[in-house]
Image (tube, rainbow, N blue to C red):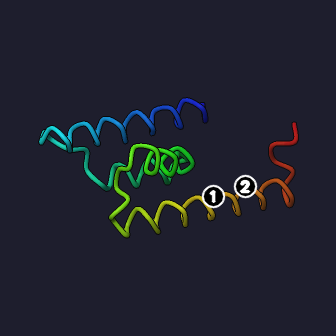
Amino acid sequence: MAYFNQYNNICIYALDKYKAVHHLWRIPEKTLIFLAIIGGSPAALLAMYTIRHKTRHIKFTLGVPVILVIQIIVLYILYTRYGIFTG
């Protein structure tokens, strides 16, 4: 499931970049941020810098890395305190 979310996020960022270049209807920024929040932040960060999309927007250049750090902290706490992901 997590890999599917990452793949989708990269595809959605690429689609939005394509639409931006061709002056077509765009994917709302709140949707892109939401996808990062629900677990797609590594892919969002990768897509931002590989296809150079949304790299001029502070909301994305600061927001997506902050979301990623928060997600890493939460996963660390879940793993160390509650033993989640240990099987």
Residue at 50% x, 32% y is 7
Quadrant of the rendering where the C terminus is positioned: top right
Q: Is residue 37 above or below residue 17?
A: below
Q: Is residue 47 above or below residue 8?
A: below
85 left or right, relative to 55:
right
Q: Which quadrant would residue 47 be assigned to in this image? A: top left
69 left or right, relative to 34:
right
- Please report contact status of discs 1 and 2: CB closer than 8 Å, yes or no: yes
Q: Label 2: how many residues lie within 10 Å, few (<14), some (14-19) or many (20+)?
A: few
Quadrant of the rendering where the N terminus is positioned: top right
Q: Secondary structure at mark 1?
A: helix
Residue 75 is labelled as 2
Picture coordinates of residue 38, whole percent (x, y)? 51, 48
Residue at 25% x, 50% y is 28
What type is the residue that disc 2 sits on?
A: Leu
Q: Secondary structure at mark 2?
A: helix
Q: Which quadrant would residue 70 be assigned to in this image? A: bottom right
What type is the residue that disc 1 sits on?
A: Gln
Q: Label 1: how many residues lie within 10 Å, few (<14), some (14-19) or many (20+)?
A: some
Residue at 43% x, 50% y is 48
Residue at 33% x, 65% y is 57
Distance from disc 1 to disc 2, alpha carbons, whole Å, reads 6 Å
Picture coordinates of residue 23, whole percent (x, y)? 12, 42
Residue under pointer 1: 71
